Image: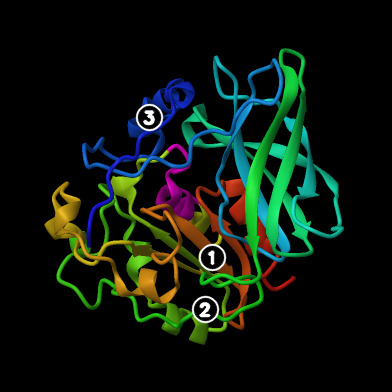
Amino acid sequence: MAVRFIRPIARNSIAVLIFFVATLAVACGGAATTVPTEVPAAASPAVDGSGLKTIVVTKELEVGKQRVAFMLTSPKALIKVPEVQVTSVFLGEGKAVSETKSAGFHLWPYGVRGSYVTEINFDRPGPWRLDVVVEGEDVQGKAEAILNVSEGGGVPNIGSIPPLSRNKTLQSVESIEKLTTDYAPDPDLYQITVEDAVATGKPTVVVFASPAFCTSPTCGPQTATLSELKSGHVGEANFIHVEIYETPDEIQGDLTRATLSQPIQDWGISGLPDWFNESWTFVLDSDGRVSQRFEGFATLEELESALRSVLPRS
């Protein structure tokens, strides 16, 4: 696998990126790494005197109701007001449905970063713009984000049945170091394959992530959050972490040694444009269908809500 190096970035984005990169060693829950990584798309241009900008977390969007997550920054700091208003605007030819929704702020672990999340119904493919209005006590202004919505992507969407992967487990390898780059792995997340999990008839939560290489502003401690979710639902569902890289114990901080794991390829994640090693989380119902999917970091609150929606009602 060829390593993709950092692209040149605009000067007006450097301050924002430095702010985020400075928090990575703490917020990603792993040791700092010097491995070259691809910087995510730079923050959007400011649209008014407030200097507010967006950093889009969810870039893989399809026609239909989709989870949309983004960060908001000012020239000074990350914006953390509890709620903002978001209006979707179609930029292509023809008239499309526009809607205004509230996007709530979700604070990430360690209290350093967070993202705004809402659901938008995109009724057609093509270019869309999100107009974001912030009316907080200490900050007011507008920002925008440009999105591209496809007719259908390569990653399993809501309602689809994903590949029944035979991911490696503790029963198929000599040690847990061959399963994950996590410096403090939870053995419970490596007990069952996706195929066998679906066969149990229980809901399943699958996280694709590489904890040691969680290096972008939109990456967070997803495997640790999965373990926390599992602790509250022991025996009710299956919880699986699939490492992005095939031989994590041989990488030793050098991605030129790495090859992609088969499941990350089978699920279409590695084929996404500009994807490097962002995490993806899928919540499957008892029939093995995707009930919800999360591109980038998903908080415990979001995962809890998604899992409860597919658990049997008592």
Name the quadrant of the N terminus: bottom left
Instruction: Give the image location of residue 270, x and y in percent.
Output: 39, 65
Badge 3 element: helix
- In this rendering, the label closer to the viewer, 1 or 3: 3
Amino acid residing under circle 2: Pro
Badge 1 element: strand
Q: Nearer the viewer, residue 289 or 183?
A: 289
Q: Which residue shows up at 20% across the image and 52% down it?
A: 255
Task: Tell me, yes or no, whether the highlighted magenta stretch contains residue 223.
Answer: yes
Q: CA distance from mark 1 to mark 3?
A: 26 Å
Left or right placement of residue 133 versus residue 7 in this view: right
Marks 1 & 3, CB-CB < 8 Å contact: no
Amino acid residing under circle 3: Val
Judge whether 227 appears above or below 202 on screen: above
Judge whether 143 appears above or below 258 on screen: above
Residue 232 shows up from this direction? no
Q: Which residue is mark 2?
A: 162
Amino acid residing under circle 1: Phe
Q: Which residue is mark 3?
A: 21
Magenta span covers which residues? 217-228
Q: Which of the 4 image quarters holds residue 179?
A: bottom left
